[in-house]
Image: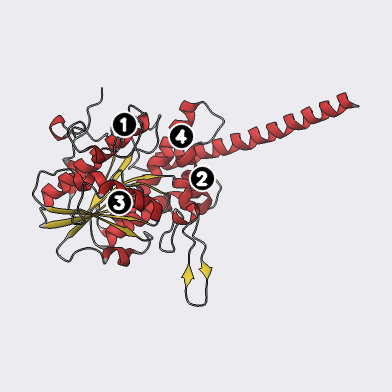
Amino acid sequence: QQQRSSLHETSNGAMEQSRWQRRTEKRRQRTEELLNSIELQSEKLNNLKIPTLGIPQSSAIDWDEIDPELDPIRGGKLRQGSQRGLRKRAQVEAFHFVVSAILNAQSPSGVTIIDAGCGAGNLGVSLAGLSYSSSINIKVLAVDVNEHALARLSNRADAILSPEKLETFCADLANYDLILSKIPPNHSVIVVSLHACGAASDMAMNLAIRCNAPFILCPCCTAKSLTKRSPSNTEKRTTFDLSASFQRSGASADIEYPRSKWLMDKLHDTGVVDMATEDKYTLLAKVADIGIGPQTLSQQRQQQARAKTIVELDRLLAASEGHGYDVRLMRIRDHDPLVYSKGDLLIGGKDIAETLINLPEEEIQ
């Protein structure tokens, strides 16, 4: 009887595994069909090569010469020589270079860099303390809804940066007007955002668009944007429990997906997989975030990179189509999408086409 029971359990396990494998294989095939169809019918994706931002040696940051608190490894307490620490340095260097290029082209008298979803400040502290080629009055406004992260940022920054150089502000990124009320009247704005999860990256873009400002974004966790914020109704107002991660990264009422007419048209095409438009985007966003298994890691990363390119182009084209922004998609160096998927650099602004075109590209070895 024990032997029969064991055989029965093994048989059921095999059946369940077989069902799971069949469902996964079907999802993978459906994903491949969706990606192929969008790529084949889109001129924007035909032979698209996303260039890596090339930073000349003359503009590179000498990490040994700057204050240790400005270094995401030493100041951010990351392990020396770790891949995460080296990537953080590359990210800071890329943002600093593009901010400098925009400043050199526009030459405002004063500028506030809004670090949207700043976390503990690996980007914002560096941007506030690093030097720029122009003598512009630069201030960083570090915005996050997480008070504990802002406290860590302040503890790190207080010893080296004055309030005139860096200010923290605890606010939901969806409160655009509240955040913009903190900008001095004589200042221009640049919005930056590094790894603001899910829809928080879209809120950062919307914040820039609200004041016609340039933006530099490096999004992550695309699947988290699929969650719509769930309001808690009180007698006086509608509120959101932003202590929950899924609420902070979930889409606010002003954000819909797909974001662009370009991708909406592609997904509406009846020839693209027999699924509802919303389901097609959901599939894209999930694959862009975590891929779909079981595949070899290389196969999973390739499909993931293709989906993420479409999702990020959708974001950029929303700014271009609806708001007249010049946009460009690049990658941060040492962020091979087949190894690490969070290195896409979304850059946009009004009347900055020449600046975008002139951003240097890393030579392909």
Q: Residue furthest right?
A: 1
Contact flag, marks 4 and 2 (Cβ < 8 Å): no
What crowding class fits label 1: few (fewer than 14 Cα within 10 Å), some (14-19), or many (20 or more)?
some
The residues tagged by marks 4 and 2 sit, at their Cα atoms, a distance apart of 12 Å
Dot placed on the residue nearer the N-terminal end, 1 or 2? 1
User: To which residue does mark 3 refer?
Assistant: 154
Q: Nearer the viewer, mark 3 or mark 1?
A: 3
Residue with the mark numbered 4: 303
The tag on residue 107 is: none
Residue at (16, 48) in percent of width and height:
102
Q: Which residue is mark 1?
A: 86
Mark closest to the chain's N terminus, 4 or 2: 2
* Residue nearest the observer in this picture, 271 or 278: 278
Distance CA(mark 1)–CA(mark 2)? 32 Å
Question: Is 278 situated left or right of 137 in this image?
Answer: right
Report helix, strand or loop for mark 4: helix
Label 2 and label 3: CA atoms lie apart by 39 Å
Q: Residue furthest top?
A: 365
The N terminus - image quarter: top right
| Relative vertical location of residue 317 with respect to residue 25 in this rendering, above or below | below
Q: Please tell me which of labels 2 and 3 falls first in the chain.
A: 3
Give above or below for 189 relative to 92.
below
Residue at x 23% of width, y 47% of height: 159
Q: Amino acid at mark 2?
A: Leu
Mark 4–mark 1 distance (CA, rounded to whole Å): 26 Å
- Measured in 3D between alpha carbons, the distance from the residue under mark 3 to the one under mark 4, in whole angstroms, is 40 Å
Contact? badges 1 and 2 (CB < 8 Å): no
Mark 3 residue crowding within 10 angstroms, few (<14) / some (14–19) / many (20+):
some
